[in-house]
Amino acid sequence: CKVIAFLGVLSCFHTAFMLFCVSVTRYLAIAHHRFYTKRLTFWTCLAVICMVWTLSVAMAFPPVLDVGTYSFIREEDQCTFQHRSFRANDSLGFMLLLALILLATQLVYLKLIFFVHDRRKMKPVQFVPAVSQNWTFHGPGASGQAAANWLAGFGRGPTPPTLLGIRQNSNAAGRRRLLVLDEYKTEKRI
């Protein structure tokens, strides 16, 4: 029963400590990459891993060493933690420490998100509105739909500046052709 309790607490705290260390190394790799490449060597990473295991074992031992803390209840077929009045503060302390580690992990990731957001290279997209005096919509923001409508025969009014040199479908065959120079000048005057 004590072995199961020890392994449960050990795995819980080991996961929390390891996630915190991973978040710190990710932050260092992105925000301080020069420091990260120079200082975080194989031995440094091994020391961090050993420290995480040591802290996890230190957190898992106190509940196991106390006599009568965990007991096996045959009717329920499980190990239970004996809740005594003077032990309630200890279990609350372990829970608060675990919550503090997880909160610190989230804060490191939040700091990393703010760092990446502040230093992004791409500017946000800003759409340029299309220009129109007569529903032809030309300019940098035009999508091309007005030009397609004009070519299909729905256009009224002068030729949009982007379509000068192309005549609307006027014949039954529906073929487009380039304008000759005289026709182009006439269209341009209109």
Image (tube, rainbow, N blue to C red):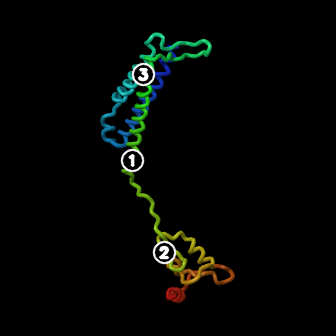
Q: Indicate the position of residue 58 as horizontal and vertical percent values.
A: 39, 19
Residue denoted by label 3: 89
Give the answer, above or below, for where 124 lies relative to 103: below
* Residue furthest to the front: 85
Whole-angstrom CA distance, mark 1 to mark 2, is: 36 Å
Q: Amino acid at mark 2?
A: Val
- Rate crowding at label 1 as few (under 14), some (14 to 19) or many (20 or more) other CA atoms within 10 Å: some
Q: Residue 170 occupies which quadrant of the picture?
A: bottom right
* Residue furthest to the right: 172
Q: Please name the residue shown 50% across and 86% down the image.
A: 188
Q: Indicate the position of residue 130 as horizontal and vertical percent values.
A: 49, 72
Q: Indicate the position of residue 169 as horizontal and vertical percent values.
A: 63, 81
> In front here: 169 or 51?
51
Q: Indicate the position of residue 105 as horizontal and vertical percent values.
A: 41, 35
**Residue 116 vs residue 74: left or right?**
left
Q: Residue 151 occupies which quadrant of the picture?
A: bottom right
Instruction: Of the two numbered discs 1 and 2 on the same chain, state the one appearing first in sequence.
Output: 1
Give the answer, above or below, for where 62 lies relative to 181: above
Q: Are marks 2 and 3 in contact (CB under 8 Å)?
A: no
Instruction: Of the two numbered discs 2 and 3 on the same chain, state the one appearing first in sequence.
Output: 3
Q: Amino acid at mark 1?
A: Val
* Residue furthest to the top: 67
Residue denoted by label 2: 131
Q: Please name the residue shown 68% across and 80% down the image.
A: 173
Whole-angstrom CA distance, mark 2 to mark 3, is: 71 Å
Q: Secondary structure at mark 2?
A: loop
Q: Secondary structure at mark 3?
A: helix
Q: Which mark is residue 116?
A: 1
Instruction: Of the two numbered discs 3 and 1 on the same chain, state the one appearing first in sequence.
Output: 3
Q: Please give the count of numbered marks on the rendered protein.
A: 3
**Residue 154 vs residue 62: left or right?**
right
Whole-angstrom CA distance, mark 3 to mark 1, is: 40 Å
